Amino acid sequence: MARVLVAAAALVANADALRAPVRMSAAAPYTLYDLPVSNNGARVRQLLYYKGVGPEDVAIVSPMDLGGLRSDEYLAVNPQGKMPALACRDEAATFGESDTIARFLGGKFNDRNGPGDFAP
């Protein structure tokens, strides 16, 4: 339990470093739309932190940059208007559930450091 709390504190401390001020990163193949207050998004952010995945691979962008959760631009990403959402540039796909996003990214970055085998 203490290990999780330490990891969560480190994640919060590094949250600004992981955030990109762009809507869809030209450099990063994946864009995660999320806010620090999202408990569901924390599952995905924890995975990225443990795997050492940086903003060059997954850009974290606020849905507010698109005009909010109910804006037409964000609803094009996630029609449910919920967080988190993942846009995949190379796969031309989007995901809207934190468990699905975590499993997808865990499989993509399975060769990175961190606990667990996320291969499908």
Image (cartoon, rainbow, N blue to C red):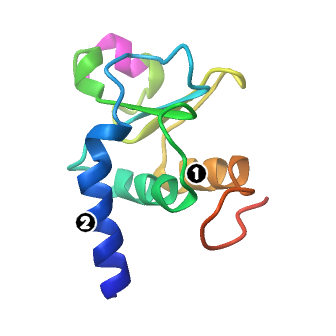
Residue 95 in the figure: left or right of residue 34: right
| Three-letter code for the amino acid on which mark 1 is drawn | Thr
Residue 8 x/y as whole percent: 30, 66
Residue 100 is marked as 1
Q: Verify whether residue 14 appears in magenta.
A: no
Badge 2 density bin: few <14, some 14–19, many ≥20, Cα 10 Å: few
Please identify the residue farthest to the right as the structure is shown.
Answer: 120
- Locate residue 73, reporting x and y percent: 36, 12
Q: Indicate the position of residue 18 as horizontal and vertical percent values.
A: 37, 39
Relative to residue 34, is residue 64 drawn left or right?
left
- For the point 68% across and 56% down, which residue is it? 112
Element class at badge 1: helix
Q: Which residue is mark 2?
A: 9
Q: Examine the rendering and report whether any part of residue 69 can be seen.
A: no
**Identity of the amino acid at label 2?**
Ala
Region of the chain picked out in magenta, as a range: 70-75
Residues at marks 1 and 2, CA–CA distance in whole angstroms: 24 Å
Total labels drawn:
2
**Residue shown at the point (50%, 52%) measured from the top left:** 48
The quadrant of the picture occupied by the C terminus is bottom right
Residue at left 55%, top 54%?
102
